Amino acid sequence: MTGRWTYRISAAGVLALAAAAFTLSYDALHQLALDSRVRPGLAWMWPVVIDGTIVVALLTVLAAKRAAASTGYPWTLAGLFSAASVAFNIAHAPDRPVARLVFAMAPVALVLTTHLLMQQASWRPTPDRPAGWAAGPEPEHPHTPGDHPAHQPPSAEQAAPVGARARVRAAYEAQVAAGQTPTGAGLARAAGVSERYGQRLLAEFTADPTLAGHPNGDSRPATAAATTRTAHPEGR
């Protein structure tokens, strides 16, 4: 069985378990809403609000991680509503320890299976990192084994697509030359790459003294460049 089929079967199993856990928890919460004299025509909404918030909050955690945003609030929301769902399921259970445990398992299983589904979604290749991305193309500046360039490109440069890196670098140099302060989001928009990739290259370019001092891409130190211009003036 290939890895793709393993992933699909595992994802289908997680979805089936999550649906079963949601159904069991929904029935208990719906009955509790009816017992609490919520109108029958509206009682079905209450379980959706409780358990639906758990699912949406956990999915928001996944979206926030991909966007490199804070996950504190969605995690807090998922924890609060998970505890509320477990408490309400236990409140509806008969007054026996085993029965309370049985009713508590449905919301717990819903939370755990939804978290498993989040993990599986994070395993799938993203558009800016297709399968085999780590292998990378040829280096941007190939050289023979005898060459020893003064500035060795980092591993991230070798792994990234050449065209994308060149576009980000050109956008960075143009913004620095114009007196602007480059940002990861601005470089990503200008070069047509993901914001995370733009932020990573921004940090790399900012830490590179040869780029920070020479926005036009001259990788030589200032003293060396000045010496060359003096030794070889224009017109000679």
Image (spheres, rainbow, N blue to C red):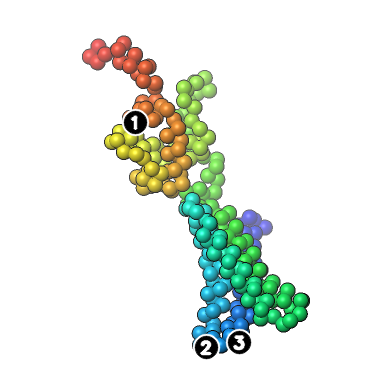
Q: Are marks 3 and 2 in contact (CB under 8 Å)?
A: no
Direction from residue 96 to residue 123 in the image, left or right:
left
User: For the residues carrying marks 1 and 2, which lies nearer the camera in this image?
Assistant: 2
Percent coordinates x, y for residue 21 in the rendering: 64, 73
* Residue that numbered label 2 is attached to: 39
Q: Earlier in the sequence, mark 1 or mark 2?
A: 2
Dot 2 amino acid type: Arg
Q: Please give the label number shown on residue 215.
A: 1
Image quarter for residue 20?
bottom right
Q: Nearer the viewer, residue 43 or 128?
A: 43
Q: Secondary structure at mark 2?
A: loop
The CA distance from mark 1 to mark 3 is 71 Å
Percent coordinates x, y for residue 55 in the rendering: 55, 67
Direction from residue 233 to residue 185 in the image, left or right:
right
Q: Earlier in the sequence, mark 1 or mark 3?
A: 3
For the point 51% across and 59% down, which residue is it?
A: 73
The CA distance from mark 1 to mark 2 is 68 Å
Dot 1 amino acid type: Pro
Q: Nearer the viewer, residue 14 or 51?
A: 51
For the point 65% across and 76% down, which residue is it?
A: 89
The answer to whether residue 223 shows anywhere in this view is yes
For the point 53% across and 35% down, which residue is it?
A: 155
Q: Please give the label number shown on residue 111.
A: none
